Image (cartoon, helix red, strand yellow):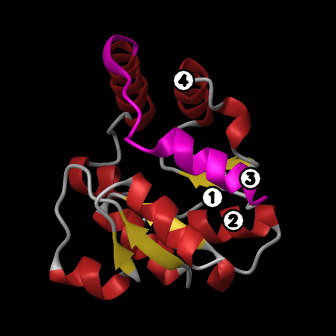
Amino acid sequence: MAFSERYGKQFDFDGFWTAASTLHSEIVELRLCLKAGVVELLDFLDDTCLPRAIATSSRHEDVQRNLGAQGLRDRFQTVIARGDYSLGKPHPEPFLKAAERLGIEPELCVALEDSYNGVRAASGAGMMTIMVPDLLPPTREMEELCVYIAQDLHEVCALIGAHL
């Protein structure tokens, strides 16, 4: 684990994660915003019967709380979260587990990511990776790993719709 390598074996990762999650929860309760186009994209995926999963580094309880706060808990067939895999992003294991749970070959999956390590993981899993930048702009590496860089989820929805 990167934390123990950097801070030593005595580093209390669970305590750190609990404190960070508590702080994150407080921030989320004050300002949980959905990305533009997420509801429309989920509606489109429902209309076209395309399955979807979440592959995240967050804990299950955090994901469920955040999805529940927006009424999105039942919009995903499965959630792969911390504890469901041994190797996290940038390793492809979270995405491979998501594809396995959906019963879909990874190369037939489209992965949407906003982080560099997420793009690396999804691409490493052999998925068609689309970056939807959030805090970090796309780099040359991200452009090479992705099949497309989208400005927002509205653009992703149009792109998928054009290829069905």
Within the magenta stretch, is there residue 148? no
Q: Picture coordinates of residue 138 (x, y %)?
A: 20, 69
Task: Say whether residue 133 is left or right of residue 72.
Answer: left
Q: Counting other residues with Cα less than 10 Å from the Cα at mark 4, is it few (<14), some (14-19), or many (20 or more)?
A: few
Indicate the quadrant where residue 5 lies.
bottom left
Q: Earlier in the sequence, mark 2 or mark 1?
A: 1
Left or right relative to 129: residue 152 = left
What whole-number distance in Å separates the C-alpha atoms at marks 3 and 2?
25 Å
Report the mark closest to the observer, 1 or 3. Answer: 3
Taking depth in this image into account, of 59 and 40 the one nearest to the observer is 40
Closer to viewer: mark 2 or mark 1: 2
- Name the N-terminal-most of marks 3 and 2: 3
Dots 1 and 3: beta carbons under 8 Å?
no
Please give the range of residues in magenta: 29-49
Q: Magenta-highlighted stretch: main secondary structure? A: helix
Q: Which residue is mark 1?
A: 85
The answer, for residue 115, to whether it is visible in the render is: yes
Closer to the camera: disc 4 or disc 3? 3
**Front-most of residues 32 and 9:** 32
Q: How far apart, in angstroms, are the residues tagged by discs 4 and 2?
A: 25 Å
Earlier residue among tags 4 and 2? 4
Against 118, is 124 above or below?
A: below
Measured as percent of width and height from the top left, residue 154 is found at 42, 54
Dot 2: few (<14), some (14–19), or many (≥20) neighbours within 10 Å?
Answer: many
Secondary structure category for the residue under label 4: loop
Q: For the residues labelled 3 and 2, say whether their Cβ atoms are less than 8 Å apart.
A: no
Name which residue type carries label 3. Answer: Asp
Say the numbered circle drawn on residue 47: 3
Residue placed under numbered mark 4 in the picture: 70
Quick one: quadrant of the C terminus?
Answer: bottom right
Mark 4 to mark 3: distance in Å? Answer: 20 Å
